[in-house]
Amino acid sequence: MTIPKKAEVQLYAPSDPQNVAAVKEADLLQPQVGNWSINIAEMAGDDAVLSDSTGAVTVQWSGSTLQGHVERAAPDRGIWQGLIVGGKGGLNKAVTAQHYYQTPAMNIVKATLELVGETLATDSTGLNTVINYPRRAVSASRCLDELCDVLGLIWRVKLDGTVWLGTYTWPTAKTTFVYQRSNNENDAKLMPDVGQPLLEPGTTIVLDSSAAATAEEKSAQKIGVAMYTISDSLSKAQVWFVDPLADSQIDDQLAPDRMHAGVAALSLQALRGVDWYRSFQGQVVTQRNDGTLDVILDAVKGIGELPAIRGVTVSVPVGGAVRTVRANERCTVIFEAGDFRRPRAVGFEGVFGSAGAGTLGVARQTDTVDRNSALATWMGQVQTFNAQVLVSIGQIATYINGIAPGTVTPVTQTVSAIGATVATISSSSPDLKLP
């Protein structure tokens, strides 16, 4: 069955909806995460027919209307070829660097998208969390990836061109189609009925409910990727189902996406050597007799990726120094040279959420020392003396003027007995304090 192409896919500029161009050959790819794209291999017309001055274009694909942007165009002797992406073409543009402190994620996402001319979908969810985010001067799409990673969300450009963030709820698709075949449990080939809305990722379908269908074909299956293709000879759809054994919140975002899972797995394999170059935060349980620590590491983005680590070496400021670490202190753990056999604690702070309990400043070489009261009294009395000593051959004469016998109170404590009470440090560093 071949659907008439003019009714199937048409393009026009939003500013001139009456000037319509018919697409002869194209494919539409809707990934589970990211932006949709239409690769047009052949269409009669030229750039004036396609888009307005901003590159905006409206695509009517069967029963769905898509709002996109002409990413590249190649008109050649009356035949137009090109690539259209969802939205307004801003997701690959760089944003400015900015640090957001204690800011709702909703505000961060909106501000980031506005910088590149994109719009947040009104049905986005999961953005009420208040976070700190040092936004880098990178593409807006990379910022969305980073934010979704920490929030446990995914992002996708909807057919209307708005950018949606949230988690899939898997409603049942309302599109009707003819189920053709499935080579395996990963995908299925369909022939959509004329005028039906497009199947989209994040929805579920039942391939076949007839008595002859298999149990799998009768069960609701989750669409991860949807691809439509039209040409002079065919109009078809192919969907890839989500891998039920993969978890997009634990694994890479593409892990459940069976169409791209191979590429994702290859990338993870190639980059597996960098996993142990990361730093981890945790809380000290105890310090062993050999000076090493037992540390419980924090969950990474809500997932307990690593177990408690024993025998963590303590970094000290100078060689030979000894650092006593208290239970419940916070620390940063790294693995030296990416070797998981060599954990090391490199930074410490107070109990989680506290500013530190240090109140005593560290003394420096030129800081002052105050005498205790007994020593100060004795020295004051001695300073009232005016002693003069004459030394001659075989004779020593001492003259003490201005003081009566018994005026000076003897210090009854020995130096060792006085100990630390002889004097106390009275000034110290304002920058470093210890408990």
Image: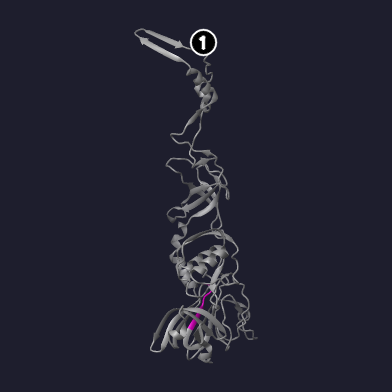
Position of the C terminus by quadrant: top right
- Secondary structure under tag 1 reads loop
Whether residue 355 is situated above or below residue 274 in the rendered picture: above
Q: Position of residue 124 (x, y in %)?
A: 59, 70
Residue at figure coordinates x 50%, y 45% from the top left = 292
Q: Position of residue 310 (x, y in %)?
A: 52, 50
Taking the view exactly as shown, the residue that stands out farthest to the top is 394
Q: Position of residue 359 (x, y in %)?
A: 55, 40
The boundaries of the magenta stretch are 27-33
Pointer 1 residue: 405
Say whether residue 395 is left or right of residue 29. Answer: left
Which amino acid does the dot numbered 1 rest on?
Answer: Pro
Task: Indicate whether residue 166 is drawn in magenta.
Answer: no
Position of the N terminus by quadrant: bottom right
Whether residue 342 is situated above or below residue 256 in the rendered picture: above
Counting the numbered discs, the total is: 1
Residue 286 makes an appearance in the image: yes
Query: Front-most of 302 and 380?
Result: 380
Whether residue 209 is situated above or below residue 133 in the rendered picture: below
Query: Front-most of 215 and 28?
Result: 28
Taking the view exactly as shown, the residue that stands out farthest to the left is 393
Task: Indicate whether residue 28 is drawn in magenta.
Answer: yes
Residue at figure coordinates x 58%, y 50% from the top left = 353
Whether residue 139 is situated above or below residue 337 in the rendered picture: below
Taking the view exactly as shown, the residue that stands out farthest to the right is 211
